[in-house]
Amino acid sequence: MRFSALGDVAMLVPVVGSLAAQYPDLRITVLSSPFAQSLFDEIAPNVSFMGADIKGEYRGVRGLNALYRRLAAKHFTAIADMHDVLRSSYLRMRFNLDRYRVEHIDKHRAERRRLVAARDKDMRPLPSSFDNYADVLARLGYEVRLEFTSLFPPSGGNLRLLSGRIGEKKMFQQWIGVAPFAAHKGKIYPVEKTEAVVAELIKRHPSCRIFLFGGGAREFEVFDTWCGRYKNCLNASATLGSLREELTLMSHLDVMLSMDSANMHLASICGTPVVSVWGATHPSAGFMGWAQSPENAVQADLPCRPCSIYGNSECLRGDYACLTSIDPMTVADRIETLLRD
């Protein structure tokens, strides 16, 4: 079970995919928020999805008790708590009382605190979320080699399902994804600098298509402005009608530019190379996208970094230099290296 943000749930995909492939006789049920269903629907024949709105239908102790009864009726043989928050701990307690095999994730909280300490940081990389998830399964008796490649076949998802809304990919035409937003200010490269990257990419590749990903009124306002200025741009999130369709498009991108955000993880599980921009957070915390090269993580070398695991802390300097000091040409050049590969 793993609730919480889309990016964290997306990081579970390579682990579940690897588990399903290596234990084909094992029946696996992923318990998560309903929005995550499309991540697991077609991952493997022996994987099913169970959606639970723990802030709505299953809210509070009464709701969690109802959810537990629903889960217990399925007679699972083992329970993997991949979240370890108050709600999942309560469910875990109920399972333990009924003598289920139960294990939970080690988030290495002490090591995280040392990583983001204002003084005397310990910059040793923490285990990745993928490794932490796999460790839970190992303690339940299911050793897993992480060998996942993509939600889609090597040729990508079926673009015909998008009904021509994004056009056809022409020979030698670059398809570039841009996801310039994140949940917290400490993870967002300044919008005007991201636009400078977009303008530079169009200058270098006049026939390229740039697909913009992100939801919300503020995001769409920015996207509408860019689409008005650059004919190469398309607001993919507004044009497409579902997360599954966005994933299908991502599987055909030549590269994705993203923050340390859910879209980095979504593109990664589609097998797409990602150039990621990091500010208050840091890849050493273990949240790098699946199978992404650290060389493609663009970041400023500042002694105060990282100051936050999730990017939700106030900037200690007050100027977010970790983001504002990054030259757009540095980002564009890193994208260019992937377009040339």
Image (cartoon, rainbow, N blue to C red):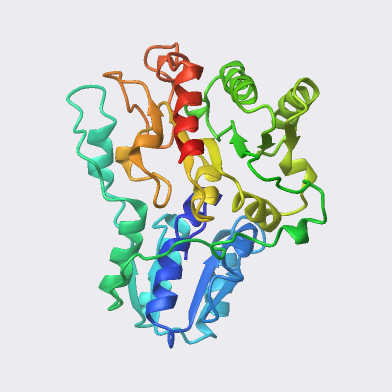
Confirm whether residue 312 shows in the render: no
Using the image, determine if residue 209 lies above or below residue 307: below
User: Which residue is located at x 47 percent, y 51 percent?
Assistant: 8
Q: Residue furthest front?
A: 171
Give 226 or 86, whichever is nearer the viewer: 226
Question: Residue 268, how many percent across, how many down?
Answer: 49, 50
Using the image, determine if residue 54 lies above or below residue 220: below
Write down the quadrant of residue 124 in the picture. top left
In this rendering, would 324 be left or right of 224?
A: left
Using the image, determine if residue 37 lies above or below residue 29: above
User: Which residue is located at x 55 percent, y 40 percent?
Assistant: 256
Confirm whether residue 146 shows in the render: yes
Question: Residue 259, how many percent across, how many down?
Answer: 50, 34
Using the image, determine if residue 137 lies above or below residue 325: below
Q: Total of numbered circles in the picture?
A: 0
User: Which residue is located at x 39 percent, y 44 percent?
Assistant: 288
Write down the quadrant of residue 281 in the picture. top left
In this rendering, would 108 be left or right of 318?
A: left
Give 222 or 310, whichever is nearer the viewer: 222
Write down the quadrant of residue 303 in the picture. top left
Question: Residue 272, how many percent across, how many down?
Answer: 52, 49
Question: Residue 145, how many percent across, how many down?
Answer: 31, 69
In this rendering, would 78 be left or right of 167?
A: left
**Which part of the image, by quadrant, shows the C terminus?**
top left
